[in-house]
Amino acid sequence: MTECSTSTNNYLELLKTRPMIGAPLAGVSTPAFRRIVRLFFDGLLFTEMVSVEGLIRKGSGTMVFLRTNENDMPLGVQLFGSKSESYGDAVKVVLETMAPAVIDINMGCPVKKVIKTWSGAAMMKDEENIAKVVRAAKSACGSVPLSIKIRLGWDANSVNYNEVIKIAYEEGADAVTLHGRTKAEMFGGQVHYDLIADAKSRAKLPVIGNGDIVCCETHKRMLETGVDGVMIGRGMMKQPWIFQAINDGKATDGYLTLPRLKDVITRIIELEQENARGSRYIDASKKYIVWMLKGLPGAAALRSSVYECTDRAQLDDLLERFFLSISDTQTDRS
């Protein structure tokens, strides 16, 4: 077992200068979306989660997740998989392909297709395997920090975050991100801030708090637990400017002017077009458009029209008319 010292912890040093982190989000943390986030944030972002089995095979469908661009750093890579024997080779493939700031292991995803392979949150049911996985990954990481992302436990009857954090520390992990819910709670109910605070008070490695950080108030509430950093997930995917808004101490809703918001949406469509094949970028862009416009007058009615668009011209025309209608409404009220 390896004992890590927080005095020489590279992850902790990163958190001292950039205490907010953009979470790895499947289907969202693409190179295109990360470039949008970079308009507002220069801290640590992550790739989508990447299969260790796919990395070992170097399949094209997996290696695409390691694509980077000139503005991507610092960028971490999140891995998922339950077989400890696969992690050493998978980490080596990552290091041969790019220069990650961090390598993270997903032990918290509650989605059925992930946990049915005993990956994600299902790993928290097998502490012995967690030790093997962390040990194998750490042995291949070299100087690159290793972290794990976990939940409080499988359900209310099997809360074991402190035991898992202790194992990760003993096997050499440099940090842990803790989502303040169990797997059974999924994303419902309230985040258990008291349990995050408990984890931080006991842990011998940096703890990053995660869950429901969507504004300055929730960011402050998470910091009050004593965590070393804060990871923002769903708040980022809906409002990628959230990092800048929090740093400015301002509300995320209405943070961007309408012309700026329109520019950001246009840019994500362009970036998806650069990264996707054929017309697939249209479908890839739709979710971002719906998310970013949510809460604006007429956005709910616009949603179905966005999803019915089949080409760029339709989408551009729809957005042009939408923003024009909002501008007219605001002018009438002034």
Image (cartoon, grey):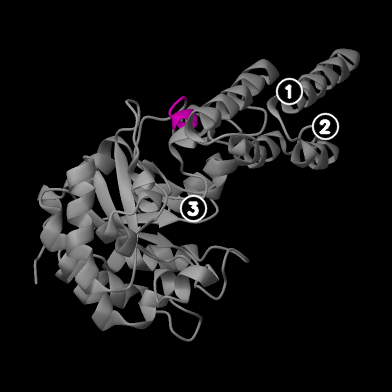
Q: Looking at the picture, which amino acid does disc 2 mark?
A: Pro
Q: Is residue 226 visible?
A: no
Could you say which quadrant of the image residue 104 lies in? bottom left
Q: Are marks 1 and 3 in contact (CB under 8 Å)?
A: no
List the single residue furthest toward the bottom: 157
**Principal SS element in the magenta part?**
helix
Q: Nearer the viewer, residue 106 or 189?
A: 106
Name the spot of residue 294 as percent of width and height, x first: 72, 39
List the single residue furthest toward the front: 278
Name the residue that disc number 2 marks.
Answer: 297
Indicate the secondary structure of the residue bearing disc 2: loop
The residue that appears at 87% across and 20% down in the rendered structure is 329
Name the mark nearer the viewer: 1 or 3.
Answer: 1
Does the segment drawn in magenta span residue 79? Answer: no
Q: Which mark is residue 26?
A: 3
Q: Are marks 1 and 2 in contact (CB under 8 Å)?
A: no
Residue numbers of the magenta segment:
35-39
Does the segment drawn in magenta span residue 36? Answer: yes
Name the residue that disc number 1 marks.
Answer: 313
Residue 43, placed above or below residue 91: above
Quadrant in which the N terminus appears: bottom left
Say whether residue 1 is left or right of residue 76: left
Say whether residue 332 is left or right of residue 4: right
The residue that appears at 43% across and 68% down in the rendered structure is 151
Q: Residues within 10 Å of mark 3 (few under 14, many from 20)?
A: few
Separation of residues labelled 1 and 2 (CA atoms): 23 Å
Q: Looking at the picture, which amino acid does disc 3 mark?
A: Ala
Quadrant in which the C terminus appears: top right
